[in-house]
Amino acid sequence: MNSFMLPASLDTRAAPALHEALMGFDGQPLTLDGSQVETLGGQCLQILLAAHESWTKHETPFVLENPSDALTAQWSAFGAPPLQLGPQGDVQ
């Protein structure tokens, strides 16, 4: 499985690079490491949700592991649906 370390800042400026990076893994199993995330903005949240939906639709593994406390808190603050994660549970 491919892995990708999410950057510390997932704000509006990071959205184009995040989208491009994820599309580079299109159709391949992917594990995202969220341990370094300090900031999650709405556009990057939408990109992550859309990628998860696309990978799920194509029955390809897409896993977010090691979410930082900031990622978990900001994900929840947006009211986003839980995203299935690795061994540590869901981002809620």
Image (cartoon, rainbow, N blue to C red):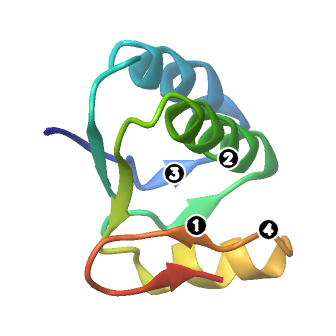
Label 3 and label 4: CA atoms lie apart by 18 Å
The residue wearing badge 2 is: 49
Image quadrant where residue 92 sits = bottom right
Viewer-proximal residue, 29 or 49?
Answer: 29
Q: Is residue 41 above or below residue 75?
A: above
Q: Position of residue 57 (x, y in %)?
A: 59, 34
Label 2 and label 1: CA atoms lie apart by 8 Å
Horizontally, is 13 left or right of 85 in the view? right
The residue wearing badge 1 is: 83
Q: Are marks 2 and 1 in contact (CB under 8 Å)?
A: yes
Q: Earlier in the sequence, mark 2 or mark 1?
A: 2
- Circle count: 4
SS type, badge 1:
strand
SS type, badge 4:
loop
Residue type highlighted by circle 4: Ala
Q: Are marks 4 and 2 in contact (CB under 8 Å)?
A: yes
Label 4 and label 2: CA atoms lie apart by 9 Å
The residue shown at (40%, 21%) is 21
Label 2 and label 3: CA atoms lie apart by 17 Å
Q: Position of residue 4 (x, y in %)?
A: 25, 40
Image quadrant where residue 33 sits = bottom left
Are there few (<14), some (14-19), or many (20+) residues within 10 Å of tag 2?
some
The residue wearing badge 3 is: 9
The residue wearing badge 4 is: 80
SS type, badge 2:
helix
Q: Are marks 1 and 4 in contact (CB under 8 Å)?
A: yes
Residue type highlighted by circle 1: Leu
The residue shown at (69%, 36%) is 50
Are there few (<14), some (14-19), or many (20+) residues within 10 Å of tag 4?
some
Q: Is residue 33 above or below residue 14?
A: below
Q: Position of residue 45 (x, y in %)?
A: 70, 50
Label 1 and label 4: CA atoms lie apart by 8 Å
